Amino acid sequence: MKLEGKVALVTGGNRGIGASVCIRLAREGAAIAFTGRDTKAAKGVVSAVEELGRNVLFYKADVTDKGRVDEVLSAAVEQLGSIDIVVNNAGITRDSLFIRMKDKDWSTVIDTNLTGIFNVTQAVSKLMLKQRRGSIINISSVIGLVGNAGQANYAASKAGIIGLTKALAREFAGRNIRVNAIAPGFIESEMTNKLPDDIRNRTLDRIPLGYFGMPEDVAAAAAFLASDDARYITGQVLVVDGGMVMVM
Ligand code: NDP
């Protein structure tokens, strides 16, 4: 177990990729604090982590609410002792062609996907800088690397995450805090299940490995980056996409 004795905070841990990350980090020995807005969805994750014999706490919190994020951080540290790992996973899409994109669709995506990470990371980094240790993992996307028609807001947020990751990796390196990003390709989840079949099929044709990824594939990458096996890795973007971006 690579994360024995560590405490991880996962945003949007109640379902999809975030839920898999919670379970995988717990399997590696970490205690888990996770957030989300949907309390009902969180119950399954709480049970799964408890079955693994790890401490687990769910906090209902919107990442765009800075005051609530600060409260959650304080409560998690009080209840679990520290935070060693943060996985900034919460994210949304509001797709439309740029010319028709509503102001609200732009701002909601930027506020959730990018400013949400600012809110969480600023709160946690105060603690990590004092501890002089930590691993921060930001979930970006291959769309942040190559763009996508109809996703200007999402692409901007995910590219912004990569810039933020590299800036923080430089700023925090001297205090033994590593900051990395994961750029998943097409991963089966509620986010991708709502896409029409023709888009799913066209995407599948562009994946060299020939199948869609599963949330567990991203969780495995997060477990690696969180662990001491990755102790010399910071400021990197780990692409988990079955080879899709390589051939784009
Ligand atoms: P899901 O839609 O299944 O899950 C999204 C998660 O984010 C939920 O837990 C949701 O919780 C949480 N969330 C959304 N908005 C907020 C908010 N304002 N405050 C707190 N939590 C929020 O998506 P995925 O699991 O697929 O995506 C997870 C991450 O991975 C996202 O950042 C996404 O962009 C990224 N990604 C996904 C890919 C894929 O193919 N699936 C590919 C590349 C990147 P709730 O709704 O309960 O608040």
Image (cartoon, rainbow, N blue to C red):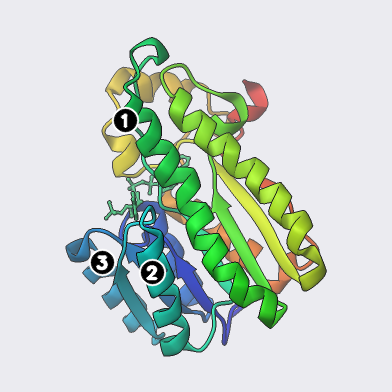
Which residue is label 1 attached to? 104
Indicate which disc, 1 or 2, sits on the residue closer to the N terminus. 2
Indicate left or right for 240 with 26 as reference. right
Q: Position of residue 5 (x, y in %)?
A: 57, 87
Identified by mark 3, the residue type is Ala
Q: Secondary structure at mark 1?
A: helix
Q: Is residue 63 above or below residue 160?
A: below
The image shows residue 139 at horizontal and vertical percentages of 53, 49
Residues at discs 1 and 3 in contact (Cβ within 8 Å): no
The residue that label 2 is drawn on is: 34
Query: In the shown orientation, is residue 47 left or right of residue 136?
Result: left
**Dot 3: element:** helix
- Whether ligand 1 has any atom under 8 Å from the Cβ at mark 3 is answered as yes
The residue pinned by badge 3 equals 42
Q: Nearer the viewer, residue 184 or 11?
A: 11
| Mark 1 surroundings within 10 Å by alpha-carbon count, few (fewer than 14), some (14 through 19), many (20 or more) | few
Above or below residue 227? Residue 11 is above
The quadrant in which the N terminus is found is bottom right
Mark 2 and mark 3 residues within 8 Å of each other at the beta carbon: yes
Left or right, residue 176 beside residue 28: right
* x, y percent for residue 81: 51, 89
Could you tell me if residue 87 is visible in this image? yes
Residue type, label 1: Lys
Alpha-carbon neighbours of circle 3 within 10 Å: few (<14), some, or many (≥20)? many
Q: Which mark is residue 126?
A: none
Amino acid at pointer 2: Phe
Q: Earlier in the sequence, mark 2 or mark 3?
A: 2
